[in-house]
Image (cartoon, rainbow, N blue to C red):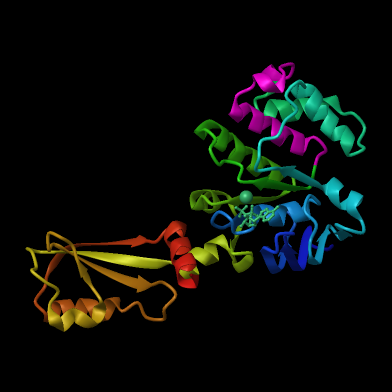
Amino acid sequence: MPPILSISNLSKTYASGFSALRDITLDIARGEIFALLGPNGAGKSTLINVICGIVTPSAGTVRIDGHDILSDYRAARGIVGLVPQELTTDAFETVWNTVSFTRGLFGLPKNPAHIEQVLRDLSLWEKKDNRLMTLSGGMKRRVLIAKALSHEPRLLFLDEPTAGVDVELRQDMWRLVRRLQSQGVTVILTTHYIEEAEEMADRIGVIRKGEIILVEEKAALMHKLGRKQLTIQVNGALDAVPPSLAAHGLELDGQGSELVYTYDTKAERTGITALLTDLAAAGITFNDLRTSQSSLEDIFVDLVRERA
Ligand code: ADP
Ligand code: MG
């Protein structure tokens, strides 16, 4: 079986001459939740819009379950559900009609039971006869999700699904994503909220200035790039870090009571043993030790800064 999504050497230069995607190559496995993380303007929406046939690529190929998005557009598009970043809805339609109509656009027979299930899953059932213009922004976003699920896609794109939405919708969305995954749906979401990638994704890709600069299993990413800090609570207070400990790169807190040692979790030696030996030699005693691990946020900030 081919990967559900296979992108090879994909580039996009807009008519303005702006190069929004540069030589992107990426495979997405069936059933994974993939988060594409990147700052505003990195090319996330462009990438999704190319895959979904809204923006034409300048070079490269994209296959969805083996179907080329250009030469085999209908088959490719039928597999995909897209929740776009921008809210666009037909104001005068009812929730039920707009979601049912979208299913029809994909040439599928009516399936009221499926539409009902989708609307119930998204807490839209009570609103099914309401016109879209009467709905709140959060409800409109739920309708966009319902539309994207109307034709039972096997690959779902969520483009910044939770930007500016309330906590309740965010949690509903995360629950929905997990349920879809358990049904075998592959989910690709873009976000500039690190917390979201950390919470949801099996794998994370980082995109910056149109280039994928890193793709990694979330756990491996956290492990590989993660740093740990060891905080040592000393007895009494220090005026400064003793010169004999200079090699360890310690930081002293404002009160002089905590020494912070930063080490690399991927390093062969953490240096902790040597540090503790040197502390004893310097006559520094301590009453507590604790470690903390950097979050994906710290990692992401470091990563983007390093490449800047
Ligand atoms: P993201 O979704 O990561 O915020 P986008 O894919 O929307 O980024 O945009 C990537 C870059 O391409 C941005 O610099 C944006 O201004 C530019 N861009 C997007 N759409 C167009 C367009 N139609 N014409 C020219 N430039 C565009
Ligand atoms: Mg975007």
* Left-right relation of 140 to 118: left
**Residue 74 at x, y = what percent?**
91, 49
* Left-right relation of 303 to 173: left
Count the numbered circles shown. 0
**Residue 261 at x, y = what percent?**
27, 70
Q: Does the magenta stretch include residue 221?
A: no
Residue 202 sits above or below residue 169 on the image: below
Q: Which residue corresponds to the image point at 79% horizontal and 34% vertical from the top-left?
A: 150
Q: Which residue corresponds to the image point at 77% horizontal and 53% vertical from the top-left?
A: 55
Q: Does the magenta stretch include residue 139?
A: yes
**Residue 201 at x, y = what percent?**
59, 53
Region in magenta: 126-152
The residue furthest front is 16
Q: Can residue 277 be seen in this view?
A: yes
Determine the main secondary structure of the stretch shown in magenta. Answer: helix
* Left-right relation of 245 to 44: left
Return the residue nearer the eye: 181 or 198: 198
**Residue 264 at x, y = what percent?**
39, 73
Residue 218 sits above or below residue 160 on the image: below
Q: Which residue corresponds to the image point at 76% horizontal and 34% vertical from the top-left?
A: 147
Q: In which quarter of the image is the N terminus?
A: bottom right
Return the residue nearer the eye: 169 or 2: 169
Q: Is residue 32 visible?
A: no
Q: Which residue corresponds to the image point at 64% horizontal and 58% vertical from the top-left?
A: 43
Residue 134 lies in quadrant: top right
Return the residue nearer the eye: 158 or 60: 60
Residue 237 lies in quadrant: bottom left
Residue 96 lies in quadrant: top right
